[in-house]
Amino acid sequence: MSRRKDAKTESLRESGALYPHPELITDPLFLKHEFFDARDLVQVKYEMLRRVEIDGLSITEAAHAFGFSRPSFYQAQSQFAQQGLPGLIHRRPGPRHASKLSDEVVAFLEEQLALDALLRAPALAEQVLKQFGLSVHPRSIERALGRRRKKR
């Protein structure tokens, strides 16, 4: 694989647009033309929707040709109708950040660790409960402190 394609793969991965199963695509356009990139999830989903809407392919045929289930097709169709192309980029479900562990709470945790480096997450969770009245799981504390260290 060329260096250019490796860079594109990495870029697609970072943006959440890397299709994990390009080998499942059997659509002739993706097999015959270099323009169509089976690794590009947005392009794959868009072309799947286009093949149904414009070319008249059945939903079952299109979903199969692009390596998707029918429910996945309907989900892509709905997201495209509501959000356009950005709706076709995969987004992880669930919260995007720790809601209880604000910057203030994490700063407090770091202060406590600076005072006593032997403190562990369960003890820190107790201190957060006393100081802020927040019940936080020790693993959430470990992840928050790990993210803070990564940023530095």
Image: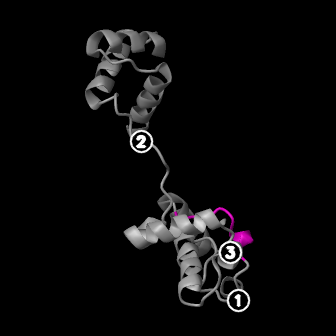
* Mark 3 Cα shell of 10 Å, populated few (<14), some (14-19), many (≥20): some
Q: Residue at x 41, y 32 (%)?
A: 149
Q: Are marks 1 and 3 in contact (CB under 8 Å)?
A: no
Counting residues from the start of the chain, the first of labels 1 and 3 encountered is 1
Q: Residue at x 73, y 70 (%)?
A: 24
Residue 120 visible in image: no
Magenta extent: 17-25
Q: Is residue 92 left or right of residue 115?
A: right
- Residue flagged by tag 2: what amino acid is it? Pro
Task: Check the image and report above or below for 30 versus 118.
Answer: below
- What SS does tag 1 mark? helix
Residue located beneath label 2 in the image? 95
- Residue flagged by tag 1: what amino acid is it? Lys
Chief secondary structure of the magenta portion: loop
Label ID, residue 32: 1
Position of residue 146 measured from the top left corner of the image (x, y, whole percent): 46, 31
Q: CA distance from mark 1 to mark 3?
A: 22 Å
Label ID, residue 106: none
Task: Check the image and report above or below for 129 versus 22.
Answer: above
21 in the magenta segment: yes
Label ID, residue 60: 3
